Image: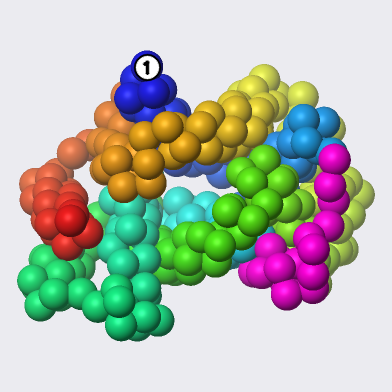
């Protein structure tokens, strides 16, 4: 049953790239989307888990803040902004390099996690795939910048790798429910601060919180996708995924992440009309094969 849940969860996460792309086309900004998504998810987690609000010490609380930034605000800002400049399938393929970067970062932090020479070889294969699909990605829009989009997707991937390392100890100490709620909370707090200092008008741009005017929210496409991202893709899927990792283990469950870009490419072709290209297929295969061969035990 948990294997089926893992496939369903990853397929849902794959559609989030498409859903975000639709919201961007509707006039929302990357900050708009992330802010509403995490606000809904945090409210839901606060209702589910509200026994403990703070960590046992300031060191762990600081680590939660870093987790909220790397796994929340920075990650989703970079990912959502990347979707403004590149195909959803391209961004998804590059972001799925996160397990590879996690392995490499872990090797730098501890000699026990030293990687074999073959890992570096397959890393080069995966990065070559990234270069190939970015160079061949052209949405035909003057505003599109595949190179910038690919770079931001790499930032998101690196950010998630740091997040994985930060939460490794926190999850054992505080449990998945509290960890997830804290990540949502600090992710929301830091993106609000970023929006306040980087946007003319601050939090109330255009006379509405985060610039989300009533005219925008009245559109069924907008609020339906925001509810999907906040309640289904974030709240429900994060909770279910914690159970999947608990039952199947971190290594076995991580293998299902490779289905993410495949799901994104399929849904983006159906709903966004993004066409598969030869460079995208070859580059995608290079990324997935290089990633799998590098991180497999």
The quarter of the rendered structure image containing the C terminus is: bottom left
The residue drawn where x is 71% and y is 46% is 178
The residue drawn where x is 20% and y is 74% is 115
Q: Is residue 157 magenta?
A: no
Q: Is residue 70 left or right of residue 204?
A: left
Quarter of the figure with residue 214: top right
Q: Is residue 134 left or right of residue 161?
A: left
Quarter of the figure with residue 200: bottom right
The residue drawn where x is 12% and y is 57% is 293
**Which range is magenta?**
51-66
Return the x and y of residue 39 as percentages of the image width and height: 76, 42
The quarter of the rendered structure image containing the N terminus is: top left
The residue drawn where x is 9% and y is 46% is 278
User: Is residue 45 something one can see in this rendering?
Assistant: yes
User: Is residue 287 something one can see in this rendering?
Assistant: no
Return the x and y of residue 49 as percentages of the image width and height: 78, 36
Residue 17 lies, with reference to residue 283, above or below; the image says above
Residue 290 lies, with reference to residue 117, above or below; the image says above
Check disc 1: other Cα within 10 Å, few if <14, some if 14-19, many if 20+.
few
Residue designated by label 1: 1
Asked which secondary structure carries label 1, the reply is loop
The front one of 250 and 227 is 250
Residue 11 lies, with reference to residue 252, above or below; the image says above
């Amino acid at each position: 049953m948990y294997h089926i849940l893992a496939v369903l969860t990853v397929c849902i996460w794959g559609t989030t790239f498409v859903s975000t792309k639709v919201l961007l086309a509707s006039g929302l900004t990357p900050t708009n989307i992330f802010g509403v998504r995490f606000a809904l998810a945090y409210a839901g987690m606060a209702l589910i888990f509200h026994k403990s609000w703070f960590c046992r010490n300031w060191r762990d609380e600081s680590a939660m803040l870093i987790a909220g930034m790397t796994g929340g605000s920075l990650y989703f800002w970079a990912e959502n902004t990347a979707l403004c400049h590149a195909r959803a399938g391209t961004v998804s393929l590059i972001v799925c390099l996160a397990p590879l970067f996690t392995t490499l970062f872990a090797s730098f932090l501890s000699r026990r996690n030293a990687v074999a020479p073959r890992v570096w070889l397959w890393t080069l294969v995966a990065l070559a795939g990234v270069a190939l699909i970015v160079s061949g990605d052209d949405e035909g829009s003057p505003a599109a910048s595949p190179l910038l989009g690919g770079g931001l997707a790499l930032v998101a991937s690196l950010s998630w790798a740091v997040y994985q390392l930060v939460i490794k100890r926190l999850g054992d100490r505080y449990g998945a429910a509290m960890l997830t709620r804290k990540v949502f909370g600090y992710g929301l707090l830091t993106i609000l601060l970023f929006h306040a200092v980087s946007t003319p008008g601050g939090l109330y741009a255009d006379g509405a919180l985060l610039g989300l005017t009533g005219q925008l929210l009245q559109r069924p496409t907008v609020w339906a996708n925001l509810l999907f991202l906040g309640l289904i893709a974030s709240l429900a899927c994060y909770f279910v995924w914690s159970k999947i990792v608990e039952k199947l283990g971190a290594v076995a469950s991580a293998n299902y992440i490779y289905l993410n870009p495949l799901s994104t490419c399929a849904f983006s072709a159906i709903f966004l009309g993004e066409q598969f290209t030869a460079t995208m297929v070859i580059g995608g295969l290079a990324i997935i094969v290089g990633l799998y061969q590098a991180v497999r035990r």
